[in-house]
Image: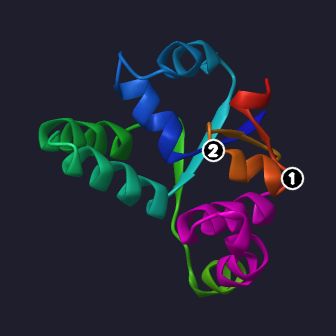
Amino acid sequence: MTIFVDTGYFVALLAPRDQWHQIAVNALRPGLRLVTSSLVVNETISLLQARGRLSAALEFLQRLRSDAEMQIMHVDARLQADAWDLFHKWGGAGANAVDCASFAVMRAMNIKRAFTFDAHFGTAGFETLAQS
């Protein structure tokens, strides 16, 4: 099964005191194909940096870049155009531009489930950890 990994999942996994930490840890199991986007990676390291956790951001980035089990999709011009179209559709519901780029990647790769706690993914028709 292929799963898209969102910022909230990464943050929950990295923060033992996060309210979603245990659910994030329990979601990992052998045989999953994990996919994220370069924009989600940027959002995650920026959030960690803003919280005063630059060392954690750098360590996360290094581990993620060397993780053979994590596929990082780079948003090209076609995916970005799709993301902007999706922003027109879902922006009013609160989905941000990175969420919409994630939706575009998920649609392009026919991914139905996301490791996220962001309700906007459910609103856009994807299954999330919060729904499991």
Q: Is residue 32 above or below residue 59?
A: above
Which image quarter is the N terminus in?
A: top right
Using the rendered view, name the quadrant where residue 62 is placed.
top left
Q: What residue sits right under mark 2 in the picture?
A: 118
Is residue 90 left or right of 6 when viewed as pictured?
right
x and y percent of residue 78 in the render?
Answer: 67, 85
Q: Find out whether residue 93 is within the magenta segment.
A: yes
Which sits in the foreground, 3 or 89?
A: 89
Residue at image point 45% right, 28% down: 12
Regarding residue 81, the answer to whether it shows in the image is yes
Q: Residues within 10 Å of mark 1 (few under 14, many from 20)?
A: few
Q: What residue sits right under mark 1 in the picture?
A: 125
Using the rendered view, name the quadrant where residue 94 is placed.
bottom right
Residue at image point 36% right, 17% down: 17
x and y percent of residue 103 in the render?
Answer: 71, 62
SS majority, magenta: helix
Is residue 103 left or right of 61 when viewed as pictured?
right
Magenta span covers which residues?
A: 83-111
x and y percent of residue 104 in the render?
Answer: 71, 68
